Image: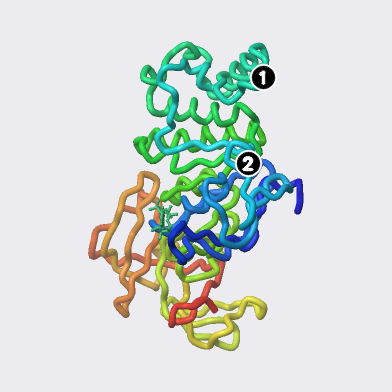
Amino acid sequence: MNSNLALQIKDLDVRYPGTNLSAVQDISFELAQGEIACLLGPSGCGKTTLLRAIAGFLSPHLGEICLKGTTASTPGRVLSPEKRNVGVVFQDYALFPHLTVQKNIEFGLHKQSPLQRHSRSTELLKLIGLSELAGRYPHELSGGQQQRVALARALAPKPTLILLDEPFSNLDVELKERLTFEVREILKAENMSAILVTHDQYEAFSMADRIGVMDKGRLQQWGSPYSLYHEPNSRMVADFIGQGVFLPGIKTQTGIHFELGDVSVPDRESPSLSEFDLLVRPDDIIHDDASELQAKVVRKSFRGADFLYTLELESGSRIMALVPSHHNHAIGEPIGIKLELDHVITFDRSGAGS
Ligand code: ATP
């Protein structure tokens, strides 16, 4: 056990009472002090179950959860939620309607003197940018302001870890984007470790130092947003994170060959299979009017700075390309493309990784 880590999970398996099916299984990962992680995955994959087990609301069938180097959950012994020093921010914020903003923030500080409580809540009001609204009641705040108060209330007792369960799901897209950055900054300013559950990979990308992708109760991959996008370890992760397509390829003496050409690959990165599916992301394809390699625009989606084009190759296979939006091509038009494949990621054609 390592006390420099905010959280350590080892071989965790959680079953709901009355069932002998594991809602999550074989889960192991670590979170350093001050790190922010996001759990991502399709509905029903076990994100909330994992969060509830970390908070102490569910006990493990197998495995162990350690907080700051101390065992918090094992099959025989579960420290109660209020004794674990873990703050939880729920989807609906759950602020106390009869308490002012400042009193809401002070709620978890009952063991401290009134002076200490006031000083900590004043410090947090400043951090969340709501000092002016200290005397208001929750119903007098916007959704984004309520969210920040809920976060400040969870931060007030300086917990070991904060758990956020889809904290932005009730907010509109613009506010969600802004708050994602704000919440990250607030957590970083407090050197707080946090785990956030979300459905939204873009939220995870802008918020997290680490992302855990879950599927069918298992943690498929745990890594930085960059490594998950560029080095997915399974077809499921490659599919779930970002956009892209799989094109059939074969191994050659110097690298690989597929419909868009030959790519030389250093020996150590050479695929282990002779035939495989190659992951091609939109950023692997560069638009180049001068290129002889052509593909036909079959769909386009305007994103402000760029277009996401869906392009059809000669074989009928489709790829995607991100192209600066001043290159505005019509549907049906052939455009020149070039391949700029940084990472050669291949998967078994049957579905498993190579
Ligand atoms: P979502 O994204 O839809 O919120 P999730 O990834 O959070 O889903 P969980 O809620 O953790 O998924 O559910 C994981 C599994 O546990 C599912 O198969 C679900 O049906 C099951 N489950 C959840 N709550 C209970 C419960 N109280 N009793 C029995 N099974 C449950």
Q: Nearer the viewer, residue 129 or 8?
A: 8
Residue at 52% x, 21% y is 129
Residue at 38% x, 41% y is 169
Residue tagged 2 = 193
User: Residue 115: where, in percent of width, then height?
Assistant: 66, 11
Q: Amino acid at mark 1?
A: Gln
Residue tagged 1 = 112
Q: Label 2 neighbourhood size at 10 Å, few (<14), some (14-19), many (20+)?
A: many
Which label belongs to residue 270? none
Instruction: Indicate how the structure is coloured in the image.
Output: rainbow
* Ligand 1 visible in quadrant: bottom left
Q: Label 1 neighbourhood size at 10 Å, few (<14), some (14-19), many (20+)?
A: few
Element class at badge 1: loop
User: Residue 242: where, in percent of width, then height?
Assistant: 44, 58
Q: Amino acid at mark 2?
A: Ser
Element class at badge 2: strand
> Do we see residue 300 in this rendering?
yes
Q: Tag 2 or tag 1, which sits nearer the N-term?
A: 1
Q: Measured along the vertical axis of the image, is residue 349 above or below residue 54? A: below
Quarter of the picture holding the N terminus: bottom right
Q: Nearer the viewer, residue 164 or 293?
A: 164
Residue at 41% x, 76% y is 247
User: Residue 26: where, in percent of width, then height?
Assistant: 57, 65
Residue at 58% x, 19% y is 126
